[in-house]
Image: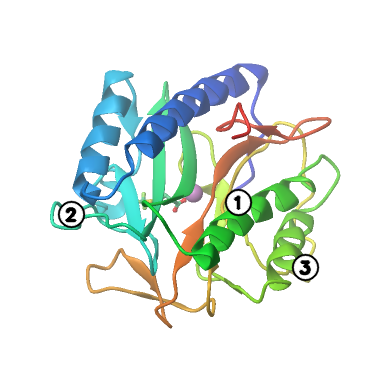
Amino acid sequence: MAVSIKSAREIELMRESCRLLEIVHDELGKAIRPGISTLDIDRMGDKMIRDMGCIPNFKDYNGYPASICVSVNDEVVHGIPDKNRILMDGDIVSLDAGLIYKGYHSDAARTYAVGEISREAQLLIERTRQSFFEGIKKARAGAHLHDISNAIDAYISQFGYGIVRDLVGHGIGTSLHEDPQVPNFRQRRKGMKLAPGMTLAIEPMINLGRGDVEWLDDDWTVVTEDGSISAHYENTILITEGEPEILTLSHLP
Ligand code: MF3
Ligand code: CO
């Protein structure tokens, strides 16, 4: 499939979709504390998205049963919310959410500390987030896809963390997943040239240990093979003539 270049009108719709998603994330982030269940988070996010008049795009996507992916500790992504999974002091939790506004998709993820976490876990969360920013420094018209992948890899590798290779970022627009794929690890092949009007979801998934992952029997939950904790950070961005625009992040926390 060809990579879509969004028109000015489509960019406005993407902006609004992403602005609304950012509000959802901010509210969910405030709700994170020991004692709440991962299903509570899903319920809250699902309601907010629907109250905005939008559709949760993850719900029923290839059979995924919830609206918010909630992944705890060694769960990398696509954790399934469960009323019996209670967040505990010292956990880290990744929330991945998306919505559809007037046909346009947004997608973003954040990892949070639950109560007090180890220094090691805090650094993993911060560096995973920073790797996204290292990647988008290269997300400029005229650069190639691999410039983003290589920047993320170069930044993360200095810490000895494992980069997840089985899942990648992606184009986004009238579908949740569009071409091109955006890997978070070093690519020898340049890949496509970036052009204004492309919208991409860039989403490094970084493990404290090795990058290898496996799938649980629910066929969704991705966990680290070595049992180490994992962090995820994702925004939907727009390639412009100049600096990239981070559509799901209007303020830098
Ligand atoms: N950010 C995730 C992704 O791009 C969201 C998909 S979750 C799913 O793969 F449940 F919808 F699959
Ligand atoms: Co995504």
* Depicted 116 relative to depicted 214: above or below: above
Which amino acid type is marked by label 2? Asp
**Does the beta carbon at disc 3 come under 8 Å from ligand 2?**
no
Q: Which residue is mark 3?
A: 189
Which amino acid type is marked by label 1? Arg
Q: Estimate the x, y position of residue 123 in percent, counting from the top left.
A: 58, 61
Q: Which residue is mark 2?
A: 82
Taking the spot 53% from the left edge, 63% from the top edge, the residue there is 119
Label 2–label 3 contact, CB within 8 A: no
Q: Earlier in the sequence, mark 3 or mark 1?
A: 1
Taking the spot 28% from the left edge, 73% from the top edge, the residue there is 216
The mark closer to the camera, 3 or 1, is 1
Q: Secondary structure at mark 3?
A: loop
Q: Residue furthest right?
A: 142
* Depicted 218 relative to depicted 22: above or below: below
Tell which of 131 and 199 is nearer to you: 131
Taking the spot 41% from the left edge, 47% from the top edge, the residue there is 96
Which amino acid type is marked by label 3? Arg
Q: Which residue is mark 1?
A: 129
Disc 2 packing (10 Å; few <14; some 14–19; many ≥20): some
Distance from the alpha carbon under mark 2 to that under mark 3: 41 Å
Tell which of 2 and 232 is nearer to you: 232
Answer with left or right where residue 185 lies relative to residue 100.
right
